[in-house]
Image: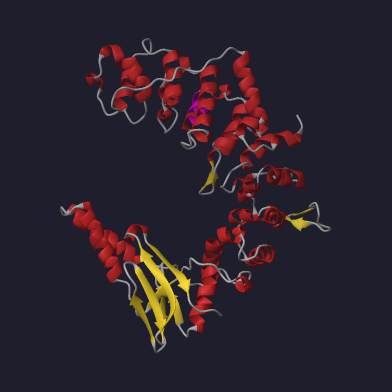
Amino acid sequence: MLISSVFTKTIEEMPAYKRLEQEFTNKGYTFGNRGHSHYKSDLRLSEVPAKDIKSYLTTELSGCHKEYVQYVSARPDEFNRQFFKDCIASNYYALEFDDNIFEWMDEKFIDEELVMCAMFRAINMRYTERRGECDEWFYSVFKRKPDLLTYDMYVLGARCFANKIRGENKFLSITPEYYRTIEYYVALCTMNSSPVMEDIPTEILSDGFLIGLINASRNNIECFTEEALEREVPMEGQTERVKIWQAVVMLDGYSISHIPLNDERVEFFLSHYDKDSYEYDSFKRRYKQYLREKNEVKTPDNSSTRLSAFMALGLAMGGATLDDAVDAGNGLSEALTNRKAELPIEYRGRVPAEYAKIYDREEYLLEIYKKLGIQVVGERDYYYYNVVLPEGSTVVRNGYGRYRLEVDGEIALEYSDMGPFYDRSVEVYNIHCTL
């Protein structure tokens, strides 16, 4: 097998997936029948017609229904291997949680075909149905019949189930040492947002390994260690070696969202992407948060929204209609805004061409405030700055949800404050002066 073939973007392209799929077919294995429940999931078995018990349990059996589990466990001859195959095909919960069906089914039913069915179903649920990792069944099989878990299953499991959470990688810890190949470690690092690379032996982390991951998907950089990020590698079109994070940023500016920020990385990004670029626009919110943390500026407090939500909830619980409760919350949100001492943070318009590469929209708005003699004290919440207006300045209501700032009788800018408190939009939409 060529090493390059293990760097894949989709799970179906993985050699391990193809090998397992071929083995499944060659051995004549089949998937269970996928049923459709016609019952409510909260029914008790005593309410289900006897003739329909099996089809009902196929779609509803899970650890959440102890009565169902006890019923099946007490009848090992009545509920056969096909029943459990059908459960795997029909019911997401049959493979999830500590008491998944592999945890308690009769051991005689647990065989290679059933375990392969579970693996393909788990992959389908994660990548097609988007229903999470669905990994607990794997640990139950490992506990009861570990010999059924083949190399290919561990490789696929590394791709699907292995995350490092609170310093522990549960899946890696159960993987036999002889299965921890380069192919396995590639699977571990592919599309993984947790710091799994921290546990990979240094001899595995060659330039080719790291570059292969990046070439497969820029997002793979999310699991890189600091040491790997700072590794200098050759890059086509560059006369000197560059750091891996630099190469990724040059190839795809959006990838900066997967790289921890520091001053060097921020400066490098800003030297390659202007403030009127789409890449910068997606980076901006994270950049602002980085500056807050660097300068030890408190994150804005959205207390007015919380108070409005509490009021609306209290009124609704007290018997008010939903519309009346929301209206009251909106009213409080409006009342808590001091039009004489607050101005918007966001600017919806375009920055003039001569300033577009120097300032983003919010920075340009701050420069306009400065030119108008408005002192910005800090961020009141997510929507407004606390400001000190100069003499001769006032905010005037300009229709429903619309306001204008007048300076010496002239309109300087217009802004809107729209929407309910839980989906509020506050933006300057018109600036009547320039720098």
Residue located at (73% from left, 46% from top): 211
Residue located at (59% from left, 49% from top): 195
Q: Which residues are magenta?
A: 138-144
Horizontal and vertical percent position of residue 383: 41, 67
Q: Quadrant of the C terminus?
A: bottom right
Examine the image and state in which quarter residue 308 appears. Answer: bottom left
Residue 115 visible in the shown view: yes
- Magenta highlight: main SS: helix
Question: Furthest residue to the right?
Answer: 239
Report the front residue among 123 and 109. 123
Report the front residue among 342 and 267. 342
Vertical arrangement, residue 387 with respect to residue 199, above or below = below
Question: Furthest residue to the bottom?
Answer: 391
Question: Furthest residue to the top?
Answer: 77
Instruction: State how the image is colored.
Output: secondary structure
Horizontal and vertical percent position of residue 233: 77, 53
Examine the image and state in which quarter residue 266 appears. Answer: bottom right
Horizontal and vertical percent position of residue 353: 62, 70
Q: Is residue 171 magenta?
A: no
Q: Is residue 141 magenta?
A: yes
Residue located at (75% from left, 36% from top): 4
Residue located at (29% from left, 68% from top): 334
